[in-house]
Image (cartoon, helix red, strand yellow):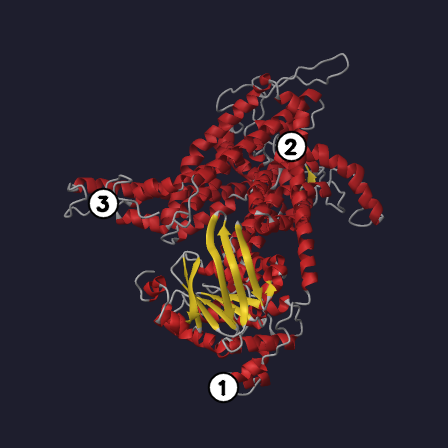
Amino acid sequence: MGPPSPSAPEGGPLVSPSEPDPSGRRLLPARLRLLRALELAFHGGTALAAAAILLFVAALLLVLVEGAAPSFLRFGPGFLSGSAWDGVHNLYGAYPAIVGTLLSSGLALLFAVPVALGVAVFLSEIAPPWLREPLTYVVDLSAAVPSVVYGFWAFFVLVPLMRGTIEPGLAAATGGAFPFSGAPNGLDLLSASLVLAVMILPTIAALSREALRAVPRANREAALSLGATRWEATRVAVLGPARGGIVAGIVLGLGRAMGETIAVAMVIGNIYLTPVSFFSPAQTLASLIVNNFTGVGIGLERSALFEAGLLLLVLTLGVNALARLLLARRSPEGMVRGASSLTRAIRRLRPHHPSVGSPRAALAAAALVGGDPKLPTERWSRHLRGRAPSNLRRRHGMEWIVLGLCLGALAVAVLPLASVLQTAVDRGGSAAVHPSFYVSENPLGCNPGPNRSCSVGGIGPEIEGTLIVLGVGALFAMPVGILAGIYLSEYGRRSRSRFGRSVSFLADVLTGVPTILVGVLVFAIFLQYDHDSASSALSGGVALGLVMLPIVTRATEEALRTVSVAVREAALALGFTRQRTSLRVVLGAARGAVVTGALLGLSRAAGDTAALFVTAGSSSFWFQGLNQPTATLTPFIFSNFGSEYGNLQADAWGAALVLLLLMLLISLVSRIAVRGHRPSAEV
Amino acid sequence: MTVKLEVSDLNARFGSKRVLYDLSLALPDRAVTAIIGPSGCGKSTFLRCLNRLHEETPGASVTGTIRLDGEDLRLLDPVAVRFRIGMVFQKPTPFPNLSIYENVAAGLRLLGVRRRQELDDGVVDALLHAGLWEEVEQDVDAPGTSLSGGQQQRLCIARALAVQPEVLLMDEPCSALDPIATHRIETLIGRLRKEYTVVLVTHNLAQARRVADHTAFFYLGKLVEFGATAGIFESPQEKLTENYVTGRFG
């Protein structure tokens, strides 16, 4: 696309008053001043929006530190090593939760990474083009499944399987040796790690795939033209350069796993003991908070929970910051492989005199310098020439093995999503097909029997509440996020200001902060300033807005940054102000991607449970007002997944199915939106 | 003159778009053949057919026969073909995460060469051949990407030479380089012709004139004329060729 023609996007050209503008009019100084003022206001406004991100991080730290202070003063470093969570004697220590968090996320990484890498290699390097997109979509989709739905599925499908078959099998095979000691019960560390692995797999796979795709085609072709098989080309020319991105994806996955709350709380057993085997029920920092947060008024326990939250924040912030730094590092020098002894040998043998040294090299070099180009040619050993490589069979065999492994990984990656969908349709389908399900209140708990039928009821209040809470969140997160994104892309990055870079970095890091902490933050702030609405639609909305904000900000920034500098310069050269360039030209060119980012934020918030669970309060009534507790979908599922009443459980499954379908719809829509206006980087 | 690569009735497509039409051409052994022609005439595609790289592009297809020393390429393993026919690209493509040494050793390692001495010899020879050795001998462990553009291109040539191919395909190897680096590469090509069959795609007519023994002129996916370089430039048989080499179009 060429530079926009002067007539295409209309906007007051900022021509100096002495020069006639293209239409022959003269620009009045007044109009100029207005444009300048607009420009200034725009710059200021977007900067303010960007500052909201800083404020968010500061508030998060401050509130947690302040809340944790009493516990810190009381226990000191003993909080890290103490293993009691004893409300009676007011003794609190986080050791079991810290161990639980590290073990569960570490194990999850161990399970997820090989599979994710196989999937990424398959999607980026092996799959034929027509298969790539749909498969990528399916894998990405499994990242959109809400964690409460994963937890629900794990509780009913994975846990019984673990308890009945896999864990006894492991115990028998190892004779109950560590780490497979103890009685298998399904609700334990191993199950939690598996669920976590399922949940972080799509993240790692997606980031690894992107890292692989970012390696230029020329690299692959260079390796191929050297006589590499396709797998060898991948290994030599693609995996190496992509290593930074892959490692970053893995670290990001680790952060996700450490902060994951709801699904873990549903399957880890929630017993506050330091795990001694894979079959130990345990607790993580996040599950500890969510299990104890409600109902705790004031006092030391609450402070201890804040301190656990602070620990979790530090852990996840640290891990995420590491991942982002790895992603940002673009200098390949740091990761060059090549421990050749040659340089060292040369340096040792001929530190100063180029004429002495490795005899062969010196001879040949001397020959070349001496103007006799024949010598190296004659010395050229010909043992390779004209022969087919002798190791071809083995190398092609390796190619097949890799293909098999990648296909296996893909199957393993897709299986959970298929099982989740199937289970949700099985158990929630019958409730969800009734139109009344979407408009009626929750039923009274009841178990259907031979001569007893139960009312099905519905999730009307939850749907209503969720929409309201999402609306409240979007109302402030969307404008602020998009403006902040504009600032980062149009002002921050370009001027390489420290402010811009740190906001962008923090927004990135914030997307990895556990939402339970966002919930705790909002709840604590409301508790202090507006006590009565601490558990309300408003507080839930604010929490969800904060969940969306960093996602929308970063997505907008990235979307705008794909619009090439040339387009901006073309607009500026026509006399557009910065503000008009940003709003009309850049935002216009990238609107598809911006909308996608907004949708992504919305769907992340819609699928979130932890933040809402802490803030929105619990209710099963229709909407009572913004300052009242409100019914919402994900906490409804979380509260009723283990219900003793069959009809409530069926309702929860119905809600899970609805959520799943909603996520499916959103990701489908966003995919279409991206396709509709793909912002071309090569404009 | 022995024929190294014999191309007959070569047709190539990208999806439904036809790029090469019924090309037939015999490339002589141990000589430099230049392919010239305006942009989009299929020069690069032709080159990429010669080492069966074209077929790796999604949607691409090839028909026709190419014989390497009389052997039909289609009957050979593409990996073996590319081992015997090396290639250098327009933009230097050193593997960014590998050192200079490992870049050159990459092909040898693929072949299963493990012994340090053998690797060292191969790497040094290839670097000497490519005329890069003196510039890098002090630090072959530096990243390949730390070199200048011209050095990177010679590194890529060294990498291709390290596995001792019989044919070297060069796709506008100097178009991203400055005149001095270009000169060095041209000198190098001049030296290589004694040992290799070089096929050089170039936009630069003067370059073709300087280094090529034979020149083929392509236009719109068809071979217009092929012959000794002097003949092509001084007494072309075809009007089209004459117009092109005299700068009337292109």
Q: In terms of secondary structure, where does tag 3 sit?
A: loop
How far separated are the C-alphas under marks 3 and 2? 56 Å
x, y percent for residue A17: 16, 46
Q: Give the image location of residue B246, x and y in percent.
A: 31, 66
Q: Is residue A351 visible?
A: no
Q: Does B242 sit above or below residue B58?
A: below
Image quadrant of residue A51? top left
Could you tell me which residue is drawn at 69 percent across and 15 percent down? A454
The residue depicted at 34 percent of the width and 63 percent of the height is B239
Residue wearing tag 2:
A421
Q: Work out whether mark 1 precedes mark 3 in sequence or the reverse, and give the earlier one.
A: 3
Within 10 Å of the Cα at label 2, are there few (<14), some (14-19), or many (20+) other Cα atoms? some
| CA gap, disc 1 and disc 3 | 67 Å
* Residue type indicated by callout 1: Asp
Q: Residue A224 placed where, x, y %?
A: 57, 61
Q: Secondary structure at mark 1?
A: loop
A450 relative position to A144: left or right: right
Q: Secondary structure at mark 2?
A: helix
Residues at marks 1 and 3 on the same chain: yes
Q: Position of residue B18 (x, y in %)?
A: 47, 51
Q: Amino acid at mark 3?
A: Leu
Question: Mark 3 sits on what residue?
Answer: A14
Residue A495, above or below A70? below
Mark 3 surroundings within 10 Å by alpha-carbon count, few (fewer than 14), some (14 through 19), many (20 or more):
some
Specify few, some or many for label 1: CA neighbours under 10 Å numbering under 14, 14-19, or 20 or more.
few
User: Do the residues marked 3 and 2 share a common chain?
Assistant: yes
Q: Tag 2, which chain? A: A
Tag of residue A372 = 1
